[in-house]
Image (tube, rainbow, N blue to C red):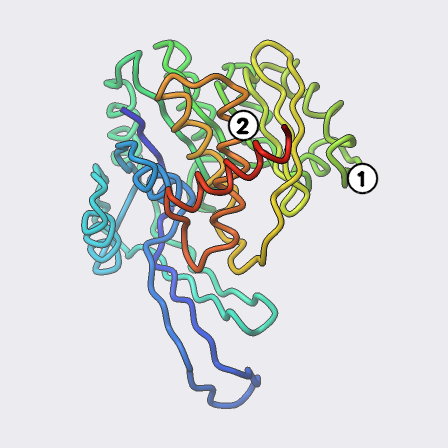
Amino acid sequence: MIYTLTLNPSIDYIIKTGSFNTGMTNRTVSEQIYAGGKGINVSLVLKNLGVKSTVLGFIAGFTGDKIESDINDMGIKTDFIRLSDGFSRINVKLADAEGTEINGAGPEIDSESLDRLYEKISNLNKDDIMVLSGSIPGKAAPDIYEKICKILSEKNIRFTLDTTGAALTDALKYHPFLIKPNHHELSEIYGADIKTRDDVIPYAKKLKGAGAVNVLVSLGENGGVLIDEYDAVRSLPAPKGKCINFVGAGDAMIAGFLSEITKGGDYASAFVTAIASGSASAFSEHFASAEFIYQLKKLILSERA
């Protein structure tokens, strides 16, 4: 079973106004509401690709109820820890105001609830896969990912880590099965100006040398790079298409990669599926269907032939 963890899930309220003017009343012309969070996004694309997963994390209040019910309605299993105080955050995204977002802080995670999470993770089996995605909430202990990675490493459970900064680099010593920084995050880690796939390669190798088993780096419309477990370097451009939604494309890449691995595919195939999944989601209103993902995968393979 694949388990995805979203520490601070949200209700994402995506609105378009046609035009947005500060200091005035603005009215929407369209509205969309989704359960949001990077781990949730991974589970959604896994579901589209026919792979079951369970969503873990913390929820609170009436918004937490909405998040849980929406995920269950999509046919995805949840095992949330309910917090007694506060409410799960609401993120307001102004789609036609230059990408302006107003993100809520989310509830405080008390020590008892955090211990319950550690216990759940301790009970996973060695055949399970854990996906840790997203930033650490400001009110949470900054070393929460490192502690979780230590538990997983001691139990020989494969895990994916998709976060930034020290939360990523401090956990490399626990040998994550997969990490997926984008090129901007890679630039921040090493203080370098990384723009192209060729630029990525030496720095991705450094992350692998620091402990990561597989390093997958996304570059948006410029594709991605994979340094795999056996030190093979793979590089692919993204297929051409109209980008509609950049939110969650990196999460879709993780889902595509893991879906192939769980079905017995090799790293070469997993990498192509990752690129196809990320691109298909970027070209879709929300997240891409399996049909669209495999259509793009076929296109990528034909262009490489």
Dot 2 corresponds to which residue?
271
In screen coordinates, is 83 left or right of 223?
left
Q: Secondary structure at mark 1?
A: loop
Position of residue 22 measured from the top left corner of the image (x, y, whole percent): 57, 84
Please identify the quarter of the rendering in which residue 232 is found: top right
In this view, 150 is above or below 137: above
Measured from the top left, where is residue 33 in percent x and y?
33, 64
Q: Quadrant of residue 46?
A: top left
Residue 135 appears in the rendering: no
Which residue type does callout 2 highlight? Phe
Residue 191, above or below 75: above
Label 2 SS: helix
The type of residue carrying mark 1 is Asp
Cα separation, mark 2 vs mark 1, equals: 24 Å
Q: Which residue is mark 1?
A: 193
Residue 54: where, in percent of width, then height?
26, 34
Q: Is residue 155 visible?
A: yes
Residue most extreme to the bottom: 24
Asked if the residue at tag 1 contacts the one at tag 2, i.e. Cβ–Cβ closer than 8 Å, the answer is no
